[in-house]
Image (spheres, rainbow, N blue to C red):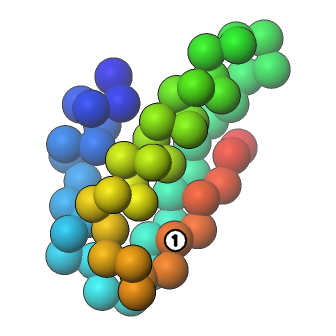
Amino acid sequence: MANLALASVSLEDAAVRVIMTVGKSKRNSGIAEFNAYVLNQIKVRLDPLVPLNFALS
């Protein structure tokens, strides 16, 4: 699921800022792993000079 979502977003061309919001569920223990995976994948693909705002909703 994460790969499918990330494949539809072009982060390599981001120049100013990336704002990413992901949903969370306190009842699902896999959500923390999912969020960590998504955040790590974004950091790998994003230019280190582009600020990243990662929020949980």
Q: Reply above or below: 43 against 17.
A: above
Amino acid type at mark 1: Leu
Residue at x-position 41% and y-position 60%: 43
Q: Quadrant of residue 7?
A: top left
Q: Position of residue 25 (x, y in %)?
A: 72, 22
Q: Quadrant of residue 15?
A: bottom left
Residue for badge 1: 52
Image quadrant where one finds the N terminus: top left
Q: Position of residue 46 (x, y in %)?
A: 32, 68
Q: Reply above or below: 13 against 24.
A: below
Residue at x-position 27% and y-position 32%: 3
Image quadrant where one finds the C terminus: top right
Within 10 Å of the Cα at label 1, are there few (<14), some (14-19), or many (20+) other Cα atoms? some
Q: Secondary structure at mark 1?
A: strand
Q: Position of residue 36 (x, y in %)?
A: 56, 38
Residue at x-position 39% and y-position 78%: 48
User: Which residue of the protein is positioned furthest toward the right in this rendering?
Assistant: 26
Image-based side of 12 in relation to 15, left or right:
left
